[in-house]
Image: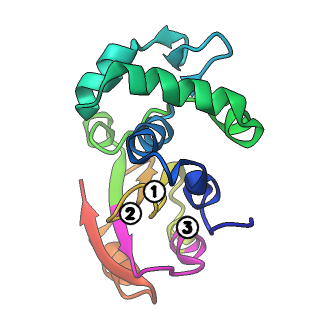
Amino acid sequence: MVQGDTMWGEIEHYFDEYPVRKQIAKTLLKYGLRVSDDMKIKAGNIEVPYTKIAKALDVDRRVVKETVAMILKVPELKEIYTNLEPTVHMKFVGRHVGYGVIEIEPEPRAIGILAKIATKIADRGINIVQVVAEDPELYPEATLTIITERPIPGELINELSKLEGVKRISIY
C-alpha cells in the first residue's frame, strides 16, 4: 500500500478537492455499493437510484452522478468500486438463531488481536461462523465482531477481555 494502511487510505486522496464526492465515495465503500460500467449504483443486482443516495446524505443527486462518473474514469477507483459487494452482518440477528455474538473494541492499531481471540475460541472447540473487522478509516469507533456457532461461555469472555489489545467486549 502506498498512501495509507487501509483501503480508504489508499483512495481517499482522489477526492481531496471534492469533499461532497468524498462523502459519497466513502458511503458507497462502507455499504459495499457497486458502481457499474453503465453508471448505475447497485447493491448486488438491485439498482439504487442516485436520488436515494443523495437524500440519505443530504446532497444533490447530480453530485452523486458526478462521483460515479469520476470513479469510472480513474482506473484505480474503477477497479475497486466495480467489484464491491454488500455483505450480511449477523451482529443483531445471530442470537436469534442460537449463535454467540461478541464485539471487541481493540486498542488503536492493535496487531494480531483477531488471531489471539480466534485461537482462544478454537481452543474451546467453538467454531467461528463470521468475523467482521471494521476499517478504522470508515468507522470512527471500529470494532471486531465475531459470530460463533454457539454462545461463548462467561469464563472465556473474561479471558478474552484480559488479552493485550482488547479495550472492551460487548455481548449481543
- Residue indicated by mark 1: 134
Name the mark nearer the viewer: 2 or 3: 2
> SS of the residue at dot 1?
loop
Can you say whether 164 is above or below 43 in the image? below
Q: How many marks?
A: 3
Residue 45, given in percent of the width and then of the height, sits at: 55, 11
- Residue indicated by mark 3: 118
> SS of the residue at dot 2?
loop
Residue 3, given in percent of the width and then of the height, sits at: 67, 66
Question: Is residue 84 visible from the viewing direction of this image?
Answer: no
Q: Amino acid at mark 1?
A: Glu
**Cβ–Cβ below 8 Å for labels 1 and 2?**
yes
Where does the magenta region start and end?
A: 103-119
Q: Amino acid at mark 2?
A: Thr
Residue at image position (41%, 27%) is: 63
**Residue 68 horizontal side relative to residue 58, left or right:** right
Please say whether residue 117 is one of the residues in the magenta stretch: yes
